[in-house]
Image (cartoon, rainbow, N blue to C red):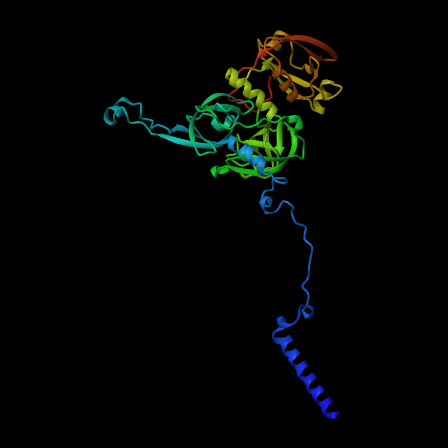
Amino acid sequence: MRRLWLIFAQTTTVALALLFVIMTLKPEWLPPSRRSSPTVITLQEDARGDAASGAAAAYGFREAARRALPAVVHIFTSQKVRTQQHPLIDDPVFRRFFGEGFESAPRQASGLGSGVIVSSDGYILTNFHVIDAADQIEVALADGRKLKAKVVGSDPESDLAVIRVKTDNLPAITFGHMNNVSVGDMVLAIGNPFGVGQTVTMGIVSALGRTHLGINTFENFIQTDAAINPGNSGGALVDASGTLVGINTAIYSRTGGSLGIGFAIPVSSARLIMEQIIQNGEVVRGWIGVEAQEITQELAESFGLPDVGGALIAGVVRGSPADQARIQPGDVLLAVDASDIRDPREMLDVIAALKPGEETVFRLRRAQNIIEVTVKIGQRPPQAARRQRTED
């Protein structure tokens, strides 16, 4: 009996020693039930799988960019700038010795910007300041082609212009509607910033109807924080479906780079101006020939006015429609037909929208009396140089 117990004890000792060695050196030899279990976590996986994992098709802007990118072009301009001539260049004796061809060589100034194809037969919408004074305009399409372009017409006061290339079957942008645009909407700015190539930036609509910025004569900007930099001018601001909602025009910056405040001309305004340029080569606006200023509280008290509403007539152009209707400096314009006038900017927009040749009733405050005069609207003269005055 003692012999059997001794054998059992020795066998158990050997088995425990063997188990210790296996657990230390070869744990994988043990049955699965003896191993330590790994930690298991539950992951939420995209049901669309790998095929759509990189496509933020439902959540991003791949489709919007795909639709809009082919319709946005790069615009390269050049201008001959003649350097200052030597003071003796026109002297006959000087020319006798140095020849008639001795003149200072012109210098080439170049610029860049962007544009939006608005029709398949070659019309391109851009900013006026992109093509202003350019001697040559070259358009680079998204497919790599480079084409010469000619100016169809321009409107310096809204900073818009239309150019055209001689080709057809171009990918035209889809126009959106401003009544579908609200503050907080996601937008993409597409253009050629700093000449690096076609670039898409994303942001939101920060504000609508921005005015009094001193950028253009006629202002009604979309404000966005989508990055807009030099070279983006004339490019497209599109919504999340890739339709055009604005033309990128200006940035607020102290350094020349984007600070998150950019401005675009709304598609509603851009389309009306574009159509007039294509049809007439220019934009026709109403004009009566007055200069107006905003009524401050101090002015209201000085003139004995009940409030600060309206536009104070500061000057009248001699022989203008306003002069013929006997509108006088010191009058306060309160309404044009049924449209109330709150400030000079609104006066400018309302009168510009009137058709030249039609007669319109103006309601004014003169001294303490309210009067009405009938004005035959004239055509606003070209204002190529003046872009920041509030005048009509």
Instruction: Examine the rendering and report whether any part of residue 297 can be seen.
Output: yes
Instruction: Please provide percent x and percent y for residue 78.
Output: 42, 29
Q: Nearer the viewer, residue 275 or 49?
A: 49
Q: Is residue 302 above or below residue 35?
A: above
Residue under the point 74% across and 21% down: 307
Instruction: Please provide percent x and percent y for residue 378.
Output: 58, 11
Q: Quadrant of residue 293?
A: top right
Q: Is residue 5 above or below residue 289?
A: below
Residue lying at the far bottom of the rendered structure: 2
Instruction: Please provide percent x and percent y for residue 241.
Output: 61, 33
**Which quarter shows the C terminus?**
top right
**Which quarter shows the N terminus?**
bottom right
Q: Nearer the viewer, residue 159 or 348?
A: 159
Q: Quadrant of residue 134?
A: top left
Instruction: Please provide percent x and percent y for residue 341.
Output: 69, 18
Q: How many marks?
A: 0
Q: Is residue 375 above or below residue 81?
A: above
Residue lying at the far left of the rendered structure: 97
Instruction: Examine the rendering and report whether any part of residue 382 can be seen.
Output: no
Q: Nearer the viewer, residue 118 or 106?
A: 118
